[in-house]
Amino acid sequence: MRQPLLIGSAGVLLQALSGWWDALSHTIQFQGGDPPLNPAHIGLYSGVGLVGVSLIMGLFRGSGWRTSLAAGFFAQIVAGGLNEVTHRLPELEDSALHFTAHAMFTLGLLASSLTIFSAVCIGMIHSEVVSTVLQLGQLTSGVALWLTASGSILYIFDTTPAATVLLGFTAATILGSAVYSSPRAYSGTLTWTIYAASIYLFTVGYAGGPPYMPIGFTATLVADLTKGKDAGRKYTRLAIMALLGMTAHIAYPTYMNGVFQILGLLLGGLIGGILLTYVGERVASDSRSSSASHLRTHYL
């Protein structure tokens, strides 16, 4: 029963990477429209297929997480079909239907990656021993969720103050969850490293953007190194997660260096820290009997 978790988490990560590739390809390779076999679309649909395979193999069977994952999967099936139709008919290329298909597909991916990441983190909180499978599931689904969320935020809000707050919030909640739900060392640093390497590959290696020095590993490494020492110190965790929100995106891309952008990232990180500390722990505790027990039985 451990294979479905690996397959499902690999599926959402493949989709997230292909989504960034697809978005940037329209400014580099396919400015006049998508070719019949856009390789990025093949990656997207292959990722959806992997999530479908994980459902068929019984991922989260017997728990409420399965409903959420299935909803995201079927939304993407419908959206993928609509997307291909709008790409093949020029009169629909810039229509409301085209936008709806893209939005539905992205929301489906957010639902699927958030479901896997949340279920795994909650299961890990209440588990004395964490298996490699569960750790890999958290790592891949966390990176997928972060890539999808940050890409959506930048697409919708561009460089506005709302974007910086939301980026900081997203970084803090995902990295904070990765750090504090896993007993293993460097779980947050690994998540940040894979995310940052992916972003750098796309924005600098593929799109030809200016090189930059990501410094997010500093706060993430501090969080990983101190997570066993600051147990119960909520204000320490809040401060660390505020720093996670700020440093995760500073210097990425280069327009995130202004004073107001940095303050926005810091504010978002602080809000994310408050949510994760005061609400997330209560939700995890309330869900202990169902999700944690199910994950311990099948995936640990």
Image (spheres, rainbow, N blue to C red):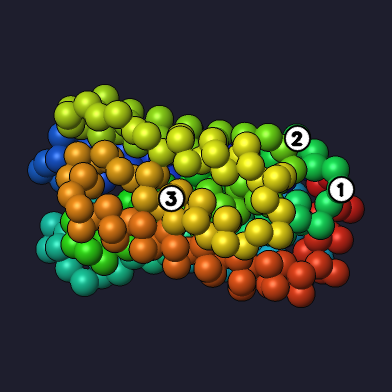
User: Which residue is pictured at 61% across the width and 73% down the height?
Assistant: 279
User: Which residue is pictured at 85% across the width and 43% down the height?
Assistant: 129
Could you classify mark 2 by the number of other residues whose Cα lies within 10 Å: few (under 14), some (14-19), or many (20 or more)? few
The answer to whether 160 is drawn above or below residue 57 in the figure is below
* Label 1–label 2 contact, CB within 8 A: no
Q: What residue did someone put label 2 on?
A: 132
Q: Answer with left or right where residue 193 lies relative to residue 247.
A: right
Eye-nearest disc, 1 or 2: 1
Q: What residue did someone put label 1 on?
A: 128
Q: What residue did someone put label 3 on?
A: 243
SS class, disc 3: helix
Eye-nearest disc, 2 or 3: 3
- Give the amino acid type for the residue marked by disc 2 in the picture: Thr
Quadrant of the rendering where the N terminus is positioned: top right
Q: In this view of the protein, which residue sits in the foreground, 170 or 66?
A: 170
Eye-nearest disc, 1 or 3: 3
Q: In this view of the protein, which residue sits in the foreground, 40 or 133?
A: 133
Distance CA(mark 2)–CA(mark 3): 28 Å
Residue 17 in the image: x percent, y percent?
A: 41, 39
Asked if residue 73 can be seen in this view, the reply is no
Q: Earlier in the sequence, mark 1 or mark 3?
A: 1
SS class, disc 1: loop
